[in-house]
Image (cartoon, rainbow, N blue to C red):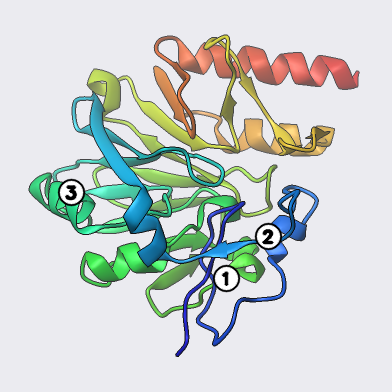
Amino acid sequence: MQTNFICTTCGVQKAATESEPSHCMICEDDRQYVNWNGQQWTTLEALQKDYKNKIYGVEPQLYRLQTEPKFAIGQKAYLLQSPSGNILWDCITLLDEATQQQIEELGGIQAIGVSHPHYYATVVEWSRAFGHIPIYIHASDQQWIQRPDPVIRLWEGTYLDLWDGIKIINCGGHFPGACVLHWPAGAEGKGILLSGDPVQVAMDRKSVSFMYSYPNLIPLAKHQIIGIRDSLAGFAFEKIYGAFEPHIAQDARAAFDRSINRYLQIYN
């Protein structure tokens, strides 16, 4: 019997195999790390026995999804409600009947966008659970897809228009295909940026950080910082919600600009 094994360190599900894979290419990359006790695997069925998801509103029409207790990286995903269809931004590994029912009550999901490979999680399971909806992944990160499936829509360029003015923006940096999502109607029309890791909200909640590797503390090159800056030129956003608890609740565009300038001053 073939099984879609899940790496316990990054939480990403692999293509089905008859036995546990010998390695996780995502964790062996220098942006991540292999479990200190050696490579370990689990399954979605095993996770469903010991973990639960919590879904709660953080803004009107914006919900945060997180798994308790923490599993793998521990990132949060976001469900964005929009008139033309709901969008799941980023993904968490655990999916169970309770989670699916609660999301269906909120209008379901019509598309999934993922910021970068560390958060691919069980994204194909999520797509199938909600009617084989499209998963948008930037083509620059195609090599990192661990479970290929026809529901994955690779796209190219800097901007992908979804609907209701919502855009996925390829800002690069953390990965060549790293993306953020811009929701112009959020924050009462002032705009919200869902940033995942590519634009990491700092603990002071008034600045952001940009890294090649967060756990291994590897910085980005100057041209990559400039690329992130240029990709977001002209976009207004009052708030930024990242992959973890801190968020910037006001004047986020100014905080982003200050952070960019701080980084670039270091390189001068």
Separation (CA) of disc 3 from disc 1: 25 Å
Q: What residue is rendered at 30% in x and 58% in y?
A: 111
Residue 260's disc number: none
Q: Residues within 10 Å of mark 3 (few under 14, many from 20)?
A: some
Q: Earlier in the sequence, mark 2 or mark 1?
A: 2
Residue 26's disc number: 2
Labels 2 & 1 near each other (Cβ < 8 A): yes
**Residue 112 picture location, percent across and down:** 35, 56
Q: Point out the image quarter for the C terminus.
A: top right
Q: Secondary structure at mark 1?
A: loop
Residue 146's disc number: 1
Amino acid type of the residue that numbered disc 3 sits on in the rendered structure: Ile
Asked if residue 233 is positioned above or below residue 113 in the image, the reply reads above
**Residue 152 picture location, percent across and down:** 43, 71
**Residue 87 picture location, percent across and down:** 28, 49
Amino acid type of the residue that numbered disc 2 sits on in the rendered structure: Ile
Q: Point out the image quarter for the N terminus.
A: bottom left
